[in-house]
Image (cartoon, helix red, strand yellow):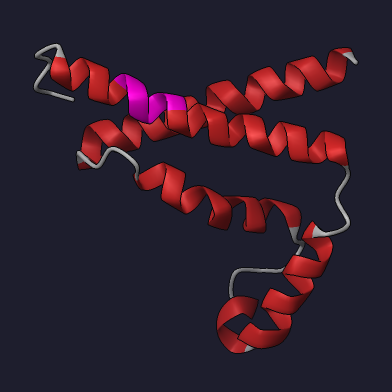
Amino acid sequence: MIQLFVSVLLYFVIFFGIAFILNMLLRTTWLMSYLYPVVVLLIVDDLPVTAYFTNPISSISEAFSRMAQITLVDWVILASGLAGTIVSGIVIKLLRRSGYRMF
């Protein structure tokens, strides 16, 4: 149970930070939230990225079959990463509205 709490907190903070930096550098608020499903796909499967270009249909099929096999705890951890990217977008929008132009 402690590992679940630490994992959820870690994924939230990591993806909040990555999304915040991408939002600040690229000035696109929701980019990481859109890219997050791709990141999850790369985390869950054991395929190299080149497999998606050399044999896309079987690679995508295998990746989605592996996603169907992950447990509820894994879904909770991955959902916390998505929540981190969404909260990052909200924070960036609030900072821009408050007058911070570097964001």
Q: What residue do we see at 55% from left, 57% from top?
A: 38
In the rendered view, tell whether residue 30 sits above or below residue 80: below
Q: Position of residue 36 (x, y in %)?
A: 52, 48
Side of 17 relative to 100 (left or right): right
Would residue 100 be counted in the magenta stretch? Answer: no
Is residue 91 positioned above or below 79 on the image? above
Quadrant of the rendered image containing residue 87: top left
Is 97 located above or below residue 25 in the figure? above
In the image, residue 77 lies at what x, y percent? 73, 32
- Residue 35, placed above or below residue 16: below
In depth, the one of 34 and 46 nearer the eye is: 34
In the rendered image, residue 85, in percent from the top left (x then y), is placed at 47, 33
Residue lying at 86% horizontally and 12% vertically, measured from the top left = 2
Give the prevailing secondary structure in the magenta stretch. helix
Dividing the picture into quadrants, the one containing residue 5 is top right
The reply, left or right, for residue 5 in relation to residue 34 is right
The stretch of residues the image draws in magenta is: 87-91
Q: Quadrant of the C terminus?
A: top left
In the image, 55 versus 61, the foreground residue is 61
Q: Give the tally of numbered discs.
A: 0
Which image quadrant: the N terminus?
Answer: top right
Seen at 60% across and 77% down, the residue is 52
Residue 92 position, x and y percent, is 28, 24
25 with respect to 60 (left or right): left
Q: Is residue 89 left or right of residue 81?
A: left
